[in-house]
Image (tube, helix red, strand yellow):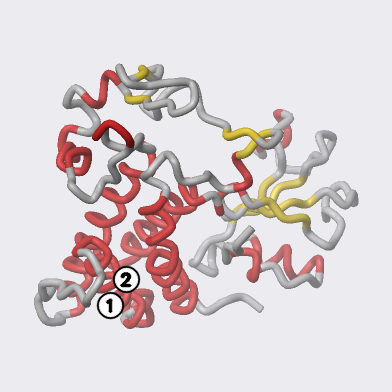
Amino acid sequence: MRPDSADYVYSLTRELSDWWGRLVEMIDARTPPPAAVRTRGALAMSAAHDCGTPWAHAADSTPAAPRVYCPACSAGGTLGARAAYLRAPAVAVGSGGSPAPLRVGALDATFAIRTGLITLEVAVRQALGDATRPAPKPADGVDLDTATVQQASSYLGRQAARVVALDTLAWAVDELRILVGLLRAQVGTARQVRAIAGPCPICSTWSLRAFLGREQIACSNAECRCEQDDCACQAGRPHLWKFSPDPRRDEWARLSLVLDVELYGLLMPTED
């Protein structure tokens, strides 16, 4: 059964709120990464930062306790506006008084998600004619950033039905999907791939896979070709079915009917 658009938006806001704590934990590079990014029992790490600059090792870095940083971004580039995070007292301190090694991708994601949710809450309140955004009031044991994320995601979730009812707020749904994509990429749920219990309607092989991070279903059969000349599968790439909260553009609806398989439960991440 296809989820109601409002239910889908609500699920996105819940995912941002529920997984925020895990994202914050991932900033500390000593936190074990998701199982999906382990290789043969060892922790895997990219050779370069997201900006493409190779990692550099800090002066007190050792093979047992590596500390890396991006020379380009730490000099005031990509992280210029977020330098305060690097100096924040909340950052764990390791032996010798040195700050704990950081995952820059997770740090960037927390900043983007927090500021993105604030922008969305303000814009939606204005569009719906609701009261001005109140200042977050952290409860005992809750930091300001977490309180901000909880308040914004809770408000957007409560107003999901009103948001999807306005065509002028379609951009807000797209922005929420982008923020959730950032979250999934860091906490590991974007890497979840699930087999579909049904044959591909094009090539009849049991090779359909659902990719949570991209909200797409792909046929993994390299020989699969549809009849559309402009489809990417004609160039040897996988044939794709893309989910959309807009029922007019949702390709999962037809695929679900053809396969007689419930697909929409695949949109929610699971703890691996």
Q: Nearer the viewer, residue 92 or 88?
A: 92
Residue 258: assigned label: none
Q: Is residue 66 above or below residue 105?
A: above
Which residue reaches farthest front?
96
Image quarter for residue 104? top left
Image quarter for residue 175? bottom left
Q: Are marks 2 and 1 in contact (CB under 8 Å)?
A: yes
Cα distance in 3D space between marks 2 and 1: 5 Å
Tell whether 207 sits left or right of 112: right
Tell whether 148 sits left or right of 190: left
Secondary structure, mark 2, is helix
Position of residue 53 measured from the top left corner of the image (x, y, whole percent): 37, 18
**Residue assigned mark 2:** 153
User: Where's the C terminus, which quadrant?
Assistant: bottom right
User: Where's the N terminus, which quadrant?
Assistant: bottom right
Secondary structure, mark 1, is helix
Image quarter for residue 52? top left
Q: Nearer the viewer, residue 145 or 2?
A: 145
Residue occupying the point 52% across, 79% down = 4
**Residue assigned mark 1:** 155
Residue type highlighted by circle 2: Ser
Position of residue 25 measured from the top left corner of the image (x, y, whole percent): 40, 52
Residue type highlighted by circle 1: Tyr
